[in-house]
Image (cartoon, helix red, strand yellow):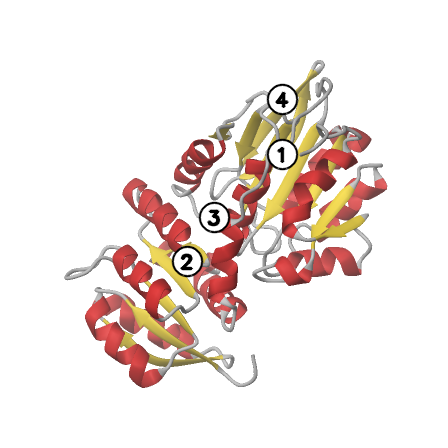
């Protein structure tokens, strides 16, 4: 976008409204055009201030954030970033918000998070999604994908997928189209702790796959999808002939934990050419160098194309450094994954 991104902050906490307004206002890319304590005030301010993007709380008086989000998507669609409490309930509600059309979900800043760049991440996300065509983005999630079927055994193969902003919808679409005996799959999606468990439950419900939040030592087997826990790195490992995962603490990489780079580099080292790497929509550069290592190790690598990305950041960098052996639209990625595993699809699908 040209000029500053106009942000409206909607949250029932006066302290948080002041904090966000003050901190975001320091960013030269952002103009905070106002703050609202509830959706009714926000509704009038949207008409008056014409913000480019909203920072939206979920649990608010008079009207909850999800109801407000759905109304906005129907009558006045805007890019919306959910800023939610780090609770189990907050995680469940955040998944509902993403399903309703929110672009991203971030944790509410706390004093202990200040050193870890939570406010910087919020600023970057608001800027990244501003100007996105919301109706088009929502239509991605509505695409009906025919499920592809495997024709042969998939043992000892690994599918590794990394994503960030916009990735929850993109990942759901990809997994819906893949077979129930897909290769063992590991996923790093930038998302706060306590939200990834709800995300895994949602994916399991929507796709019919065995999707779960990864735990230390989990086996990576056909038909299973392991999601990196928020605030932890996910690495591929081996135990004898079996692939397993390690869930680790450690410093943020590319400002993220989980980091897609950390996961991809472990997959390159452990699985080499027996893996396929996929990098989906997201801001920044996390995952690009790891995908390049996977390609150098002999793994086919895919990047989502610009036209189908919510934010063409991570795939863009991957393409620029030569990490992607193929570039494809989101709707084409499931078939490209199958082709990369050299497994044919059932005729007619």
Dot 2 crowding, Cα within 10 Å, few <14, some 14–19, many 20+: many
Estimate the spatial distance between the alpha carbons at disc 4 and disc 2, rounded to whole Å: 31 Å
> Mark 3 or mark 4: which is in front?
4
Estimate the spatial distance between the alpha carbons at disc 3 and disc 4, rounded to whole Å: 25 Å
> Secondary structure under badge 3?
loop
Q: Which mark is residue 191?
A: 3
First of labels 2, 1 by sequence position = 2
Q: Which residue is mark 1?
A: 235
Residue 308 in the image, given as x and y percentages of width and height: 62, 58
Estimate the spatial distance between the alpha carbons at disc 3 and disc 2, rounded to whole Å: 14 Å
Residue shown at 62% from the left, 55% from the top: 254
Dot 1 crowding, Cα within 10 Å, few <14, some 14–19, many 20+: many
Residue shown at 65% from the left, 27% from the top: 149
Above/below status of 216 relative to 127: above
Q: Is residue 329 left or right of residue 5?
A: right
> Secondary structure under badge 2?
loop
First of labels 1, 4 by sequence position = 4
Residue 41 in the image, given as x and y percentages of width and height: 21, 74
Dot 3 crowding, Cα within 10 Å, few <14, some 14–19, many 20+: many
Q: Which residue is mark 4?
A: 222
Q: Which residue is mark 2?
A: 102
Give the residue furthest to the top. 240
Q: Are marks 4 and 2 in contact (CB under 8 Å)?
A: no
């Amino acid at each position: 976008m040209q000029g500053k991104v106009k942000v409206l902050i909607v949250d029932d906490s006066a302290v948080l409204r002041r904090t966000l307004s003050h901190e975001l206002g320091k960013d030269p890319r952002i103009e905070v055009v106002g703050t609202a304590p509830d959706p009714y005030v926000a509704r009038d301010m949207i008409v008056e201030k014409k913000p480019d993007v909203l920072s939206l709380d979920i649990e608010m008086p008079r009207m909850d954030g999800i109801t407000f989000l759905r109304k906005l998507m129907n009558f006045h669609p805007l890019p919306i970033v959910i800023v939610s409490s780090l609770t189990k309930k907050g995680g469940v509600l955040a998944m509902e918000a993403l399903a309703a059309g929110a672009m991203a979900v971030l944790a509410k800043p706390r004093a202990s998070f200040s050193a870890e760049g939570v406010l910087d991440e919020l600023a970057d996300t608001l800027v990244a999604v501003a100007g996105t065509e919301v109706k088009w983005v929502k239509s991605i999630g509505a695409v009906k994908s025919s499920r592809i079927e495997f024709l042969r055994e998939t043992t000892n193969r690994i599918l590794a997928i990394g994503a960030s902003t916009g990735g929850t919808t993109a990942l759901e679409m990809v997994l819906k189209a893949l077979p129930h005996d897909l290769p063992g799959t590991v996923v790093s999606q930038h998302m706060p702790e306590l939200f990834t468990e709800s995300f895994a439950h949602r994916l399991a419900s929507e796709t019919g796959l065995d999707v779960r939040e990864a735990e230390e030592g989990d086996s990576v087997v056909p038909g299973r999808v392991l999601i990196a826990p928020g605030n932890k790195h996910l690495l591929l490992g081996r135990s004898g002939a079996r692939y397993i995962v390690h869930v680790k603490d450690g410093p943020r990489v590319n400002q993220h934990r989980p980091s897609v780079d950390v996961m991809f580099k472990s997959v390159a080292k452990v699985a080499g050419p027996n893996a396929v790497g996929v990098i989906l929509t997201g801001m920044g550069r996390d995952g690009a160098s790891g995908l390049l290592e996977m390609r150098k190790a002999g793994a086919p690598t895919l990047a989502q194309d610009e036209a189908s990305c919510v934010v063409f950041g991570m795939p863009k960098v991957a393409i620029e450094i030569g990490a992607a052996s193929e570039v494809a639209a989101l709707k084409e990625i499931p078939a490209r994954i199958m082709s990369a595993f050299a497994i044919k699809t059932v005729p007619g699908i």
